[in-house]
Image (cartoon, grey):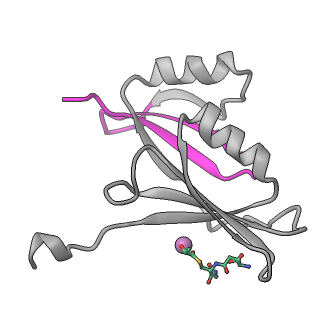
């Protein structure tokens, strides 16, 4: 398969209950940028795409706000979205300085050299932070 046609994960979509609360989380807490939005008033929903770079070469988050829906059942199927960070202690300290709760402090993953931590977004979707040393 030529490298022009390799498949790529484009985005993960999460349904959210409050646009401004989620934008604050993904931009201020996680440092993402709003890449684009799509308003569909007749279908009564708004899409907001956020990430760390352009969708042409980065996998991004798509937030879906359905007008008037104030909560979702996350169920027990959803696990997490993982984000690689260069220094997990620095990242967690930044999040703590913003008074945002940490679900799991940085911990070594058993039988692995990875250091992970967990936080949750405003709707309860878990986000795993994994320390990736930039080589
Ligand atoms: C823009 C592209 O990335 C999409 O994901 S559009 C897909 C479309 N989304 C919606 O209709 C949003 C509102 C809808 N009520 C919803 O909550 O999904 C869609 O087909 N969604 C269905 C789905 O299962 O994702
Ligand atoms: Ni989508």
Q: Quadrant of the N terminus?
A: bottom left
Residue 10 appears at what percent x and percent y? 41, 66
Taking the image in four quarters, ligand 1 sits in the one at: bottom right
Quadrant position of residue 87: top left
Residue 27 appears at what percent x and percent y? 61, 38
The residue under the point 58% across, 19% down is: 94
Say whether residue 76 is left or right of residue 92: right
Q: Quadrant of the C terminus?
A: top left
Q: Residue furthest left?
A: 2
- In the image, which residues are magenta? 108-135
Quadrant position of residue 2: bottom left
- Does the stretch in magenta take in 130? yes
The residue under the point 62% across, 49% down is: 126
Q: Nearer the viewer, residue 102 or 40?
A: 40
Residue 82 appears at what percent x and percent y? 47, 48
- Does the stretch in magenta take in 2? no
Residue 9 appears at what percent x and percent y? 37, 66
Quadrant position of residue 3: bottom left
């Amino acid at each position: 398969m030529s490298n022009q046609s390799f498949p790529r994960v484009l985005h993960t979509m999460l349904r959210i209950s409050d646009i401004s609360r989620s934008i604050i989380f993904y931009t201020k807490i996680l440092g993402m940028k709003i890449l684009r939005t799509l308003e569909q008033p007749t279908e009564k929903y708004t899409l907001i795409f956020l990430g760390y770079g352009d969708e042409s070469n980065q996998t991004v988050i798509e937030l879906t706000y359905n007008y008037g829906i104030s909560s979702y059942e996350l169920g027990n199927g959803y696990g997490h979205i993982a984000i690689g960070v260069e220094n997990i202690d620095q990242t967690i300290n930044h999040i703590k300085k913003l008074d945002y709760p940490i679900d799991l402090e940085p911990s070594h993953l058993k039988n692995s050299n990875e250091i992970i931590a967990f936080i949750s977004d405003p709707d309860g979707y878990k986000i795993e932070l994994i320390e990736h040393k930039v080589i």
